[in-house]
Image: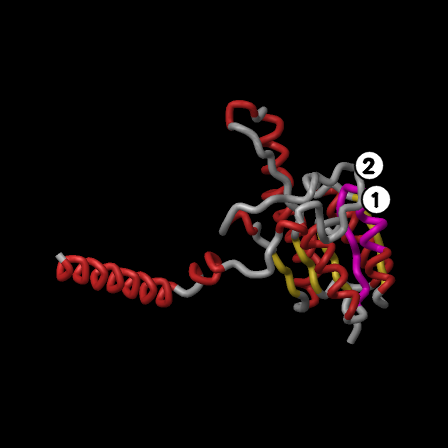
Amino acid sequence: MTQTVAIIGASAGIGRAVARLFAERGARVGLIARGQAGLEGAARDVERVGGVALAVPADVADFAQVEAAAKQIEETLGPIDVWVNVAFASVFAPFAQITPEEFRRVTDVTYLGFVHGTMAALARMRPRDHGVIVQVGSALGSRSIPLEPVDRPSGDDHGAHGEFDGKAHSRSAQLALSHHPVAVTAAAGAATAAVGVALASRVRRR
């Protein structure tokens, strides 16, 4: 069965990659974001791999815009089966240099954007008793990473990748160990034992 998928934050990064993956499965994909250039690029990605795309410019900090986007997607593509919240905003600067307005914008997009998306999705899914909502958490909750430029209303099309691709790695020993505490404990024990053997050897040589 062909799915209808709505993605908030679909113009770049994870949202852009998710849109393409659903499209590869033949989904109809509603793309929601502020940046027009990124939305148009995402629509091309979706259509290039066989999906059906609908780009809907909207500011997720405004519930009325999110609700209108959901309505347009369902009228054009059909009932939404999957809703994905990916929109993210942040400010990287010393605390004293960040303005109250900038803090407000981060909260409005990163928190209220998820709330608004979930409300719009549930209003449609609950009466049907059907649908899935996916909340995508920031990788910054686990580790610091370099990020793609902010997506401005008239901004550029950054795609799913950015200028840091050449410095990125597909694997992280630190991340793998953080997900396997038993292995970390064993490694620490082995390291401690090795240090003990080395010290004992030095004492004997003396």
Judge the density around disc 2: few (<14), some (14-19), many (≥20) Cα neighbours within 10 Å: few
Q: Determine whether label 2 and label 1 are within 8 Å by CB.
A: yes
Q: Which residues are magenta?
A: 27-43
Q: Earlier in the sequence, mark 2 or mark 1?
A: 1
163 sits to left or right of 68: left
Which SS class for mark 1?
A: helix
- The x and y percentages for residue 55 are 83, 51
Give the residue drawn at x 74%, y 52%: 10
- Per the model, the C-alpha gap separating discs 2 and 1 is 7 Å
Q: Is residue 137 above or below residue 204?
A: above
Q: Which mark is residue 53?
A: none
* The quadrant where residue 203 appears: bottom left
Q: Identify residue type, mark 2.
A: Ser
Give the residue drawn at x 73%, y 40%: 151
**Residue 115 inside the magenta-drawn segment:** no
Q: Point out the image quarter for the C terminus.
A: bottom left
Which SS class for mark 2?
A: loop
Q: Is residue 62 above or below residue 176?
A: above
162 sits to left or right of 99: right
- Residue at the bottom extreme? 1
Q: Point out the image quarter for the N terminus.
A: bottom right
In this figure, which residue is indicated by the disc labeled 2? 154
Q: Which mark is residue 37?
A: 1
Q: Identify residue type, mark 1.
A: Ala
**Chosen colour scheme:** secondary structure
- The x and y percentages for residue 117 are 67, 50
- The x and y percentages for residue 172 are 52, 58
- The x and y percentages for residue 74 are 81, 59
Give the residue drawn at x 84%, y 55%: 43
